[in-house]
Image (cartoon, rainbow, N blue to C red):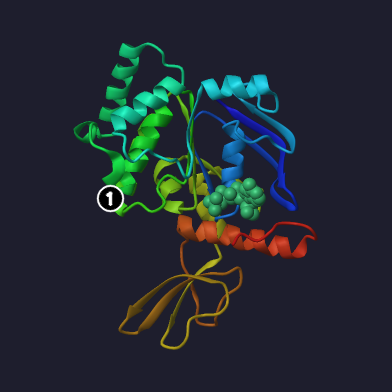
Amino acid sequence: MDIQTTGLTRRFGKVTALHSVDLAIPGGMYGLLGANGAGKTTLMRILAGVLPPSGGQVRVGGHDLTTSAGRLAVQRRLGYLPQDLGLYPDLSPREFLDYVGLLKGLDDTRARHRQVDELLELVALTEVAGRRMKGFSGGMRRRVGIAQALLGDPALIVVDEPTAGLDPEERVRFRTLLAGLAGHRTVLLSTHIVEDVAQTCQHAAVMAGGRVVYTGMVTDLVRVGEGATWEVTSSGPAPTVGVVVSAISRTDGTHYRVVSSSRPSPDAVPVPPSLEDGYVALMQRASARAHTVPGGLRLPS
Ligand SMILES: Nc1ncnc2c1ncn2[C@@H]1O[C@H](COP(=O)(O)OP(=O)(O)OP(=O)(O)O)[C@@H](O)[C@H]1O
């Protein structure tokens, strides 16, 4: 299911969470990257049909989400994993999934039970399927969350910040699970973690202050950091120009990796950028524009 937004705007009182967002998202796995407060959740909630836009157009699989008929049509084909999915701690994953399946209209009991068992297997929770979710780890909860989103075999899956708070092993596991779901579906992954997008998506959009500041290949985002990534070795204080993205202490002093559009110090050496450097350079440009364009971008916090 492809997603098209044109001039999509959402205001909350005086706060404009989305400023005229234009996006064209094809099928497959697509990343939505941005700092906290960039507007990702607002966009996801609009795409999931749970929040109406204040203005602009939004179409998912050809359905117009500004109409209730369009929202209903999309919701039938959508799986949504919100940031704060509430699980019932006293239910087991099997009971919970069965309950969500009923809410989603999967009325055939045998077919629903079969689907629940298949999904429990897919997310590697079969062994604990009958255990109460009370003591589950963050990663296990997130896997229950993705299983509920997959009930009914939706064509579009919207996943909001799914790896936040997971330990590295669970994060990798969850990412692999998500990437495996793409195939014939569209999977929209919202995150503030560059690595999540780097490891799973070919294409992504970057949001800052409610605007889209980049769309394209994830690998091309690296190029934004070209000519703006430096290494500074110093035994004194950290560089004050640009953003220090890492600091490694060695015998000859501390090696600072700095993203800055200008040379941060006379002895700074240019180095090839990583994806993270490209992302930081993009955020710097977005914030510089916010300072020069009246009424322009709000800075991400
Ligand atoms: N219901 C609401 N009422 C008022 N302001 C809101 C509401 N929802 C979002 N906002 C504001 O809109 C802006 C964008 O928030 P949003 O949650 O979409 O960002 P985000 O990129 O998803 O960040 P996070 O990951 O922290 O949720 C923020 O300034 C936020 O405070």
Percent across and percent down for residue 70 are: 65, 21
Split into 4 quadrants, where in the image is the C terminus? bottom right
**Relative height, residue 224 to residue 4 (above, below):** below
Q: In the image, what residue occupies the spot 50% across and 54% down?
A: 222
Find residue 62 and report its image quarter.
top right
Q: Nearer the viewer, residue 244 or 158?
A: 158
Q: Is residue 153 left or right of residue 77?
A: left
Q: How many callouts does the rendering have?
A: 1
**Relative height, residue 118 to residue 138 (above, below):** above
Q: Residue furthest left?
A: 127
Q: Is residue 26 left or right of residue 285?
A: left
Q: Which residue is mark 1?
A: 169
Name the amino acid, label 1. Answer: Glu
Percent across and percent down for residue 271 are: 46, 67
Q: Nearer the viewer, residue 24 or 85?
A: 85
Q: Residue furthest right?
A: 294
Q: Secondary structure at mark 1?
A: helix
